Image (spheres, rainbow, N blue to C red):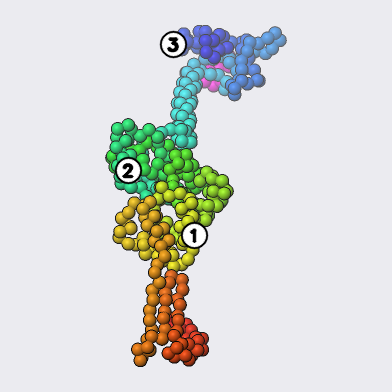
């Protein structure tokens, strides 16, 4: 008890002097050990009237009494034994103090770890320790954009930290929820990237990833549609996808329609098209419902002159190609005598055969009668 002497201290003020001269401890016939305990320690008190003293536990002469030497008394406690007991107590107290300090440090480390995992502490991470999110949201990150961001960070520093989680399968690595461009810019500058580390499930990661991009109005319409397709293919529930994209059910339906009905390779070939919104993507979706239009779109996007265009221009080139009506290709079939008996016209969706019955009236009837046989021959040829 701080600032106050203990009961034993008040009752035995001469103990310190006795220990210095190694004299016998005096007797305390009025000292009684109480049956009650406080904090696991026995209590002592002065004997009241009519109470027995504790002289049987603490003899009047601890060195020697009438029955013989103190060394032969079972309850006799010599001064050296008492000193040894006090030494043990002091050692125990020191050990307890060290244990308390150790527990305090452990608690501080635990609290710091909890703050770190909760994303309340910003740390510096080596970009080489970082992996991209398991779901891509951006379609293109140009070198020019990374260069501009790196120059800004060099001048002003990294103001907003990125968000990462401990990698679910790789030790000592982290997975980015958002901030991919900031991480690439820091890597280009050869510096560490400021990050907050948070324990995230897959669902929490994609929600954080999508909502951060939506807050900055950063993803284009087709990137959001593509993000939906990626999340849906990985089995995420509709509620999680809607939270990640921050859209209502009506807007989500538009993303689903465009993202699922336009072939993914055509979306990838066109790119993010930042200036192209939902109405024009839906127009492209309608044009691509014919298989021949899909083939023509792929052919256009494979041309060198279109591949080098910016993303918005690639979109416009494909739309223009599909909206343009191709001139029908006409062929003339002549018989062995050189007579033009059949006129064949090919379009994207049809083939028209016209036979001139004036020169060979029965040829058309013969050809029609053989169509079933010709088709069976065609099927057999395909099977071979």
Percent x, y of residue 303: 32, 62
Q: Which residue appears at 41% of the width and 47% of the height?
A: 275
Residue pictured at 30% horizontal, 42% vertical? 147
Q: Which residues are magenta?
A: 66-73
Q: What residue sits right under mark 1 in the picture?
A: 286
Quarter occupied by residue 360: bottom left
Q: Residue at x 43, y 72 (%)?
A: 347
Q: Residues within 10 Å of mark 3 (few under 14, many from 20)?
A: few
Please tell me whether residue 72 is drawn above or below residue 324 in the rendered image. Answer: above
Disc 3 to disc 1, how far (Cα)? Answer: 105 Å
Which is closer to the viewer, label 2 or label 3?
Answer: 2
Answer few, some or many: residues within 10 Å of disc 2's Cα (few below 14, many 20 plus, some between 14 and 19): some
| Residue 356: quadrant of the picture | bottom left
Q: Which mark is residue 81?
A: none
Residue sitting at x 44%, y 39%: 216
- The x, y position of residue 179, in whole percent, is 40, 41
Q: Farthest residue toward the right?
A: 50
Instruction: Give the vertical position of 66 relative to 324 (above or below).
Output: above
Q: Which one is in front in this view, the residue at disc 2 or the one at disc 1?
A: 1
Residue at the far front in the pictured view: 358
Mark 3 or mark 1, which is nearer to you? 1
The residue at which mark 3 appears reads as 20
Query: As rendered, which of 380 and 63 lies closer to the eye?
Result: 380
Lower sequence index among marks 2 and 1: 2
Tell me, for residue 146, which label it has, or none: 2
Q: Residues within 10 Å of mark 1 (few under 14, many from 20)?
A: some
Q: Is residue 69 magenta?
A: yes
Q: Secondary structure at mark 3?
A: helix
Closer to the camera, 161 or 167?
161
């Amino acid at each position: 008890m701080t600032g106050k002497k203990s009961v034993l201290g008040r009752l035995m003020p001469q103990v310190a002097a006795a220990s210095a001269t190694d004299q016998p401890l005096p007797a305390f016939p009025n000292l009684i050990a109480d049956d009650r305990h406080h904090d696991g320690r026995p209590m002592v008190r002065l004997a009241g009237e009519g109470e027995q003293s504790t002289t049987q536990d603490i003899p009047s002469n601890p060195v020697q009494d009438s029955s013989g030497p103190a060394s032969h008394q079972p309850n006799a406690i010599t001064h050296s034994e008492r000193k040894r007991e006090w030494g043990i107590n002091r050692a125990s107290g020191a050990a307890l103090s060290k244990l308390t300090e150790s527990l305090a440090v452990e608690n501080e480390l635990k609290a710091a770890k909890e703050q770190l995992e909760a994303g309340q502490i910003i740390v510096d991470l080596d970009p080489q320790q970082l992996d991209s999110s398991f779901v891509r949201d951006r379609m293109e990150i140009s070198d020019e954009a990374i260069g501009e961001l790196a120059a800004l960070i060099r001048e002003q520093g990294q103001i907003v930290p990125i968000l990462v989680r401990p990698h679910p399968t790789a030790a000592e690595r982290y997975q980015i929820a958002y901030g991919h461009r900031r991480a690439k810019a820091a890597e280009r500058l050869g510096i560490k990237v400021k990050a907050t580390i948070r324990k995230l499930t897959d669902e929490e990661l994609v929600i954080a990833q999508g909502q951060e991009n939506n807050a900055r109005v950063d993803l284009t319409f087709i990137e959001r549609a593509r993000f939906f397709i990626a999340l849906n293919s990985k089995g995420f529930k509709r509620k999680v996808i809607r939270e990640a994209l921050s859209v209502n059910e009506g807007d989500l339906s538009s993303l689903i329609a465009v993202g699922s009905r336009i072939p993914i390779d055509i979306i990838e070939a066109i790119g993010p098209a930042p200036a192209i919104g939902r109405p024009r993507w839906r127009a492209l979706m309608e044009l691509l419902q014919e298989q021949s239009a899909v083939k023509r779109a792929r052919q256009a996007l494979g041309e060198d002159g279109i591949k080098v265009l910016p993303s918005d221009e690639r979109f416009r080139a494909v739309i223009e190609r599909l909206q343009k009506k191709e001139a029908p290709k006409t062929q003339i079939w002549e018989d062995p005598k050189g007579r033009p008996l059949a006129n064949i016209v090919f379009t994207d969706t049809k083939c028209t055969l016209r036979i001139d019955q004036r020169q060979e009236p029965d040829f058309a009837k013969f050809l029609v009668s053989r169509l079933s046989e010709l088709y069976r021959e065609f099927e057999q040829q395909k099977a071979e």
